[in-house]
Amino acid sequence: MQWAWLPGYLPALLQGLGITLFVLVASVIGGFSLAVPLALAQVRGRTLPRSLSRVFCSYIRGTPLLMQLYLLYYGIGSLFPFIPGVRENFQWLVRLDAIYYVLAAFTLSFAGYEAEIMRGAFLSVPRGELEAAEALGLSRAQVLWRIWLPSAFQKVLPTLTGEVIGQLKSTPLAFTVPVMDLMGVAHRVMQDTYRIYEPLLFVAAIYLALTFLIVQLFALAELKHLKR
Amino acid sequence: MEIDWKAQTAGFQIGASALAGTVSALNLIVMAVAPLATLLSFGDEGYGDELFWGAVRTLEISLFGYVLGIGLGLLGAVGKLYGPAVFRPMFSGYTTLFRAVPELILIMLLYYAGTDAINAGLAKLGIGAVEVNGMVAAICVLGVVQGAYATEVLRAGILAIPIGQLEAATALGMSPVLRFRRIMLPAMLPLALPGLANLWLNITKDSALVSVVGFTELALATQQAAGVSKRYFALYVVAQGVYLLISQCSLSIFGWLEGNMRRGQPGTAVAR
Amino acid sequence: MKKIVKALAGVVFGLSLAGPAHADLKLGVAAEPYPPFTSKDASGKWVGWEIDLMTALCADIGEKCAVEEVAWDGIIPALQAKKFDAIMASMSITEKRKATISFSDMYYIGLPTVIGAKGADKDISPEHLKGKNLGVQASTIHAAYAAKYFEPKGVAIKTYGKQDEVNADLAAGRLDYVLADGVSLDDFLNSDQGGCCEVKAAVPYDAEILGVGVGFGLRKEDTALQAKLNKGIADLAANGTFDKISDKWKLTGKLKLPGSK
């Protein structure tokens, strides 16, 4: 095994790591925020929002993330030439860096999976608690924000670790569009040096370390916040 | 605030099948910008047959990878629970490692390193190099990765079997093998089924990842067709429709299986 | 039921290991389309200038040839792993690659060219392109050239896995310029999608990075195969087959071929 290439590429790898982490954190936060309304729509929404939410979640969970990303990036990209005037007037939109597409795809993906989990969590909160809150005069919004959501969130906290790690493992897909995340840099190393195993093993080790860190972080958070 | 009891069966959304079908239909309408009939036709003119055979290959590698994965999973689960203590760290290592490293990296490593390792091993034994068929490589790669997840799912399933049943089997004088075959396996399957259904859905989606190493299944076939025809949007939407079809049918099948298998089983399993 | 399934699996495993009738010579092509050299037509068959060359060459040297597809960035490792015997993927002969694999004699020399949107600046010197997006395919001599000459001058280099993805993004407007082989870009410019763009200029040639032409990639120990292929190439150059194939694909005069001046 040759590791001579490592010192030279370390800055690039660190930069790639930064991008990977950025995508992870942003997509988790964004995805989770999106998951709550999606779940609510399925739990107590009217027919149209409920159907739309169900269809969206089925789509996200039924198709590979790779294809979702391709559809978003190359699919939409292929439509630009057909919309007259977009190149001149909406330059910023057309030249939107690939990373935003990656963020969009990953956020939507996380939201789709989390919505299902949040749905179960919302349904498992005892009805009595919510009825009591309403009887005490809290508005529906207050019931949601003060009772329902925190209670549901408590229930999902243990599984959240696994979900975030799952999202971390999806991040290497970003390199299939021109984004220089950790995997993208590793790919570049593979091209430049013709070594395949070493860069892949190195990146695998980094992902292992990240997984370990996330598990520890969430364990700490659980200790502090999980009641009962 | 209505609670939709019908949607509570093991988390499956069987009711969403019709809706997902609507999504596919809506997609097709959306991309009727240009004539699709020629693009998707079978035969020499259209890409319909490439996509079709790509889908077939996706199903092939998913199915055989799944079977391999479950086989490895059974081995791992039994090994972890009942095997000699010396093997446990090995199985633990296998599951931890393969579940912590991203599938994409595992697939790339195994696909390139796998044949190398096999050939190196064979060279040491004095046998010449074998050419490993691309499909076999893809199946093995997917199977080995899924095996790690399957180990955990099956292990949880075994642990959920009411211990009384297993003790009774031993008391009746059944050998461990017979007990496994007659009691453990049938009891474990319905308990592990939701997890196994998840694994199947995961492997059908992970099969798209082998496109990155150049194996032509549905994802790569779509990319190739799109690359030549330049109809990226249309073709990707159609490909996703196919994946959606696969996943919805799978959900229905597993839902039916679960209903079938739960007949005669005690209500909820008692954890050990 | 599980038994039956497992038995079936075993049978199919065995069958697939047996595989199709073993061809004498397996040639690895990149799974991504690279017209006009290699691409899949609508019926799923591999067609192109290189495919025709392969047919003629194999007939000349008396071998039965088959095509094996691998991802472009894994093609050298796959060769080492003996998944096939030779690489036929418009791979340029460079000193760097020669450290890992050997090559046959060259069978064409292409001209790396920059293309861009109609109306965009024709001056493509690196300083002039500062801040613009230049697209290249990963693991190619063009990517290496861009990294050596354009990147240090502040040009934003975007690397893609497949050449048609680069072209697609140029058509979409995400890229300002693309650096790739002139002939393959020509094919793109003549398609509907390529109507947006035009040739700007060929880049100053750096033989160390851009290589001395395209050849078959071979394992270093396969000297016998190398000799066979070289003889075949020489034969085809002598009897005019190269010109015939180029005419068929409308590339007359656009490629520098073996034996021509």
Image (cartoon, coloured by chain):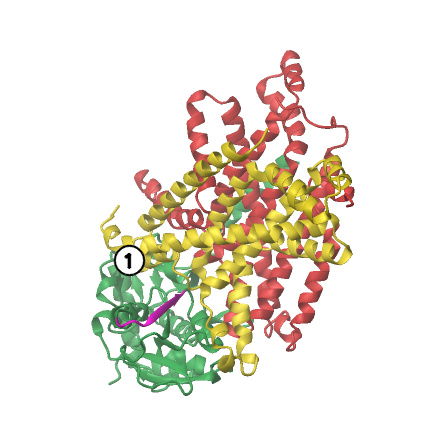
Which sits in the foreground, C226 or C190? Answer: C190
Closest to the observer: C25 or B42? B42
Q: Which residues are magenta?
A: C153-160
**Residue A215 visible somewhere in the drawing:** yes
| Residue B259: quarter of image | top right
Q: Which chain is green?
A: C
Q: Secondary structure at mark 1?
A: loop
Placement of C31 over or under B123, stated as above or below: below
Question: Where residue B118 appears, x then y in whole percent?
Answer: 38, 43
- Vertical order, A7 against B93 (above or below): below
Q: Which chain is red?
A: B
Circle 1 packing at 10 Å, graded few (<14), some (14-19), many (20+), is many
Look at 66% across and 17% down and name the residue there. B164
Amino acid type of disc 1? Arg
Query: Chain A: what color?
Result: yellow
Chain of residue at mark 1: C
Based on the picture, tell me whether residue B203 belongs to the magenta stretch: no
User: Residue drawn at (47%, 47%), measured in percent from left and top?
Assistant: A169
Residue C86 versus residue C198 in the image, above or below = above
**Residue at position x 46%, y 72% in the image:** A95
Left or right side of A90 for C83: left
Residue B60 appears in the rendering? no
Q: Position of residue A157 (x, y in %)?
A: 56, 38
Kindly give the residue lying farthest to the front in the view shown: A137
Residue C161 % position (x, y):
41, 64
| Residue with the mark numbered 1 | C219
Q: Quadrant of the N terminus of chain C?
A: top right
Q: Which one is in front, B80 or C58?
A: B80
